[in-house]
Amino acid sequence: QVQLVESGGGLVQPGESLRLSCSASGTIFRINAMAWYRQAPGKQRELVASITAGGDVSYVDSVKGRFTISRDNAKNTVYLQMNSLKPEDTAVYFCNQNIRVHLFYENDFWGQGTQVTVSS
């Protein structure tokens, strides 16, 4: 089985920074794309940032220039560096990894979610 464990959320003031981490463990043949989603109260879950196995990244417009996604393949870990945080960034953040668990099977796996609250 595969497990994703997230860390790094918390309460910060506007303009401050946080770094989220998400590490995969278990039976892993290869990790393909990794991504971060978020869901604010009363809103749908949205894709915030993604990174391919080759390192290509993409971001939702609202976080461009402030957030940076990166990955450490040796550690099966994806990071989200969040700078210049705004109150509208407040949400539960979920990581997602597309993992090939053996040669003939791959699936999307999700972390448990970590709360990020930006408030003065």
Image: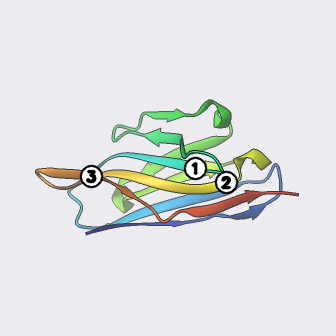
Left or right: where does residue 103 sit relative to residue 30?
left
Q: Residue 73 falls in which quadrant of the image?
A: bottom left
Which mark identifies residue 38? 1
The quarter in which the N terminus is drawn is bottom left
Q: Residue 72 falls in which quadrant of the image?
A: bottom left
Q: Are marks 2 and 3 in contact (CB under 8 Å)?
A: no
Disc nearest the viewer among 2 and 1: 2
The quarter in which the C terminus is drawn is bottom right
Of marks 1 and 3, which one's residue comes earlier in the chain? 1
> What residue occupies the far top of the structure in this picture?
61
Percent x, y for residue 15? 81, 49
How far apart are the alpha carbons under marks 1 and 3?
Answer: 20 Å
How far apart are the alpha carbons under marks 2 and 1?
Answer: 10 Å
Using a 10 Å C-alpha cutoff, classify the residue at mark 2 as few (fewer than 14 neighbours), some (14 to 19) or many (20 or more).
few
Q: Residue 75 falls in which quadrant of the image?
A: bottom left
- The residue at 34%/58% (across/down) is 74
> What residue occupies the far right of the structure in this picture?
120
- The residue at 58%/63% (across/down) is 114
For badge 3, the amino acid type reads Asn
Percent x, y for residue 67? 63, 42
Which mark identifies residue 41? 2
Q: Which residue is mark 3?
A: 107
Q: Is residue 36 above or below residue 58?
A: below
- The residue at 63%/46% (across/down) is 43
> What residue occupies the far front of the structure in this picture?
42
- Element at label 1: strand
For badge 2, the amino acid type reads Pro
Percent x, y for residue 113? 53, 62
Using a 10 Å C-alpha cutoff, classify the residue at mark 3 as few (fewer than 14 neighbours), some (14 to 19) or many (20 or more).
few
Q: Nearer the viewer, residue 38 or 64?
A: 38
For badge 1, the amino acid type reads Arg
What's the coloring here? Answer: rainbow
